[in-house]
Amino acid sequence: MLLALGWAVFLGLTFGPVAGLFAEAAARLAAGEPEASAALVPSARQRALLGRSLALAGGVAVFAGLVGSLAALALLRRLAHGRGSRLLRAGLLAALVLWVVTPPYLHALAGMEAGNWMRAALSGLGAPSRLLPDLPGPVSALLAQGFALMPIAMVAAAIGFLSVERDLIDAAMLLGPGHRVFLRIVLPLAAPAIFAGSGAVFVFSLIDYSTPSLFGLSSYAMEIVAEYSASRAPWRAALIALPLIAITGLVIGAVLAMLSRGAPAHARMPGRALRHYRPLDALRRPARLALWLAVGYGAMILALLLGSVLIWRLLPGLVWEVRHDLARTLVNAALAAGLALGPAALVAGSLAARPRAPVLRALIWLAALFPLAIPPSLTGVGLAALLACCAPDALRSAGWLPALSHAARFLPLAVLVIHAQMRRVDPLLIDAARLQRPPGPARWLRIELPLAAPGLAAAAGLVFCASIGELDATMMTAAPGQGVLSMRVFNYLHYGVSETVAALGLLLAAIVWTAAALGLWLAGRQG
């Protein structure tokens, strides 16, 4: 009963608003409305826009996947050879988490500011400005999104390398040199996870319009917002988004198919086993370069957000000026985490049950992850349209609609985090608990909840942090006069990079990083 309720809330939050838009569009198509038939077929401009968006997302996926995989390999080799204490490993994990939860537009801000600082330094040395010309918009957007999403590819590649059975490596080392072992054994077995990480980067890049727009690029995801703003017809926005949803849905399905044929879930290789083989000699230097590139970029983000004295002087006044936006940001994030936690835990429990039929299991996983294929702006449009037709004015102006859209947006991520924690729990513990205590609230409170608590804390922290930085859905659902901090930072960015914008970026990043660090600490304490 509880599992059915969890799935009902999950599907209602993630698919409900969008399903209503497509239902209206289908009704208009069935009625033979010419406007609906015209909106169903993309125009030449929209096809060109979709092609450019696919090219940008593909470039971001290749860049993040290649550099992230090389950096992961270099990092694992360092840890395998004992070049890292337990404290260092915890620090690296925390740094990756903080990198993941940093909003993409802050990465764009850091890149813009870094270019300005380097030009100012060259100018101070008397060097001509042409030595550091402005990068083309597509290249700047590719680098900003690639660096912002690279941790996803790094983590996926590390999981892939660590999932290779140590016995396979030991046996292969008896028959050939290390570079052949890496090419013929390790890399093919780790490939599904590497491609899965690149696929996730592709999806997140394709449905994001905020970062490309900062560099003057129009994207297909932005076309959804433009169509809704021009026509005020939500069903037209849904038809415009249909090609995007189909492409991202196919990518998610392909990722699931690759993972199902990848390394077995129980396969584990301790990090120290990596010292038993060496990658291609030609890969050693690129891998080390990729690792230092990632480390240097992270250091640049910190330096740009923390290094200016003027920023720190501006912060006290800015905090008071944006206090109302800041309060709404924190309230929305807390509401989103609270709304997502319950259904995410129930859906993750059903995924951990492992139905025997492979087709059924694949469909359940697809239903749990497919909401990631829905552009967040379309989710916001659907929620706004649903409340406009079915809710009183008091509810529409209450200011909680962004929190609802954030919960719908990040529910699949919460499901993945909780499911990963459930997979870590030894099934023998649950079986022993069932023998000692019958089903009921006492067993759930004393046994099952403490075992799942680290995953619940991590999932709540992830949704909270992601909600603070969410922009696309927020801009479609925020009521007039009830903006949040991410909207203010994004709007200021369009007027040029300044110390004020950097100070607001520091304030937003500090909130996200503090929440992420607290979530990691709680998860570690409860684990």
Image: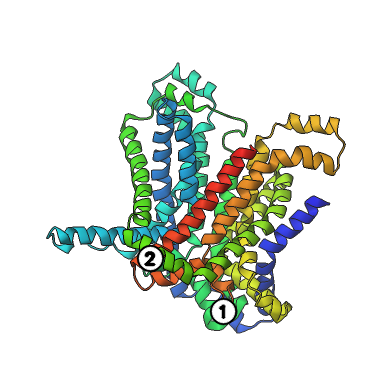
Q: Name the side, left or right, on which 6 lies relative to 69.
A: right
Q: Residue at x 61, y 39 (%)?
A: 525
Who comes first in sequence, dot 2 or dot 1? 2
Name the residue nearer the viewer: 510 or 24: 510
At label 1, the amino acid type is: Pro
On residue 480, the disc is 1
Question: Can residue 194 be seen from the camera position used here?
Answer: no
Q: Residues within 10 Å of mark 2 (few under 14, many from 20)?
A: some
* 521 is higher (above) or lower (below) than 251: above
Q: Are marks 2 and 1 in contact (CB under 8 Å)?
A: no
The residue at the far top in this view is 174
Residue 267 visible in this rendered orientation of the protein: yes
The percent coordinates of residue 494 (x first, y second) are 39, 72
Front residue of this view, candidates 246 and 309: 309
Crowdedness near tag 1: few (<14), some (14–19) or many (≥20) residues, C-alpha within 10 Å: few
- How many marks the image carries: the answer is 2
- Tell me which amino acid carries mark 2: Leu
Residue at numbered disc 2: 314
Mark 1 secondary-structure assignment: loop
Quadrant (top left, top right, bottom left, bottom right) of the C terminus:
top right
